[in-house]
Image (cartoon, rainbow, N blue to C red):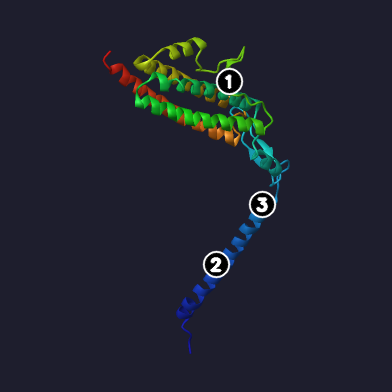
Amino acid sequence: MIPNLEKDFDDVYPLRVLKLLSQRIACVLMTVVAGTSCHKARVEPGAPPASLIVQPGAPGKASRVIAAAEARDLSRVQYTAADVRFMQGMISHHAQALEMTALIASRSTREDMRKLGLRIELSQADEIDMMQGWLRARGQEAPDVHAHHAHGAILMPGMLTPEEMGRLAASKDTAFDGLFLELMIKHHEGALIMVDGLLSQPGAGQDSDIFAFTSDITADQSMEIARMGGMLATLKELPR
């Protein structure tokens, strides 16, 4: 019987081709895997070990390689001398705001002024307690609320001079309301200047308490500046 060569060829050849292709593909894959493994295992001379971490540098500074242990230490951010000065100065800043709001009860008849004063009083009195506690916990001097009256005390940005405080205390009714709003806007803007000054110093403002506090100041006092600006505009529209 003469074999059907064409049929045998069709039946057998494709199987041989597929088998050969499979063998070659497997060989290529093994070569790639082996090459990859060798590449991973090969460490260039001078390259840092895998346990080292690259810490990005500050603006204008180069990055550096640090060990994992050092990276863990970096997570415990320390306060700076600038943070301490900021907290001490902000205590005096807030204390004067309380002196200003204390004048409202006897000099203004407007309910919106009383509500504004109460908001400022409650928030800033609470923040004074927080700042004093923060300083004491770190063994730093915690000024009291009268420190800004001491001889030679430096007024923080936005704080009123004795002459301005005297003018405010001597005014009443609508005149007081308008002057209070103008001076408290100035006072709040000074607090924002203090925050900007702190955050512009390398390493400052990174302590978690300081960071949260400065964020609150920026948000709350910016909002109050806008509110007081609206109140002042309304006052100026009233008939004289």
Tell me which numbered mark, 1 or 2, is placed earlier along the sequence. 2
Q: Which residue is at the far front?
A: 106
Q: Residue at x 44, y 11 (%)?
A: 167
Q: CA distance from mark 3 to mark 1?
A: 66 Å
User: Which numbered mark, 1 or 2, is in the foreground of this view?
Assistant: 1
**Residue 204 appears in the rendering:** yes
Is 203 left or right of 175, judged from the image as shown? Answer: right
Q: Amino acid at mark 1?
A: His
Position of 60 with respect to 190 (left or right) is right
User: What kind of residue is marked 2?
Assistant: Leu
Q: Earlier in the sequence, mark 3 or mark 2?
A: 2
Residue positioned 34% across, 23% down in the render: 110
Name the element at disc 1: loop
Number of numbered discs on residues = 3
Which residue is identified by label 3?
40
Instruction: Tell me where residue 140 appears, x and y as whole percent.
Output: 67, 28
Whichever of callouts 3 and 1 sits on the residue coming sooner in the sequence is 3
Q: Position of residue 153 (x, y in %)?
A: 60, 15
Identify the disc placed on residue 146: 1
Q: Badge 2: few (under 14), some or many (20 or more) residues near its Cα, within 10 Å?
A: few
The Cα atoms of the two marked residues, 3 and 2, are separated by: 28 Å
> In this rendering, would 53 be left or right of 109?
right
Q: Secondary structure at mark 2?
A: helix
The spot of residue 41 in percent (x, y) is 69, 52
Q: Residue under circle 2?
A: 21
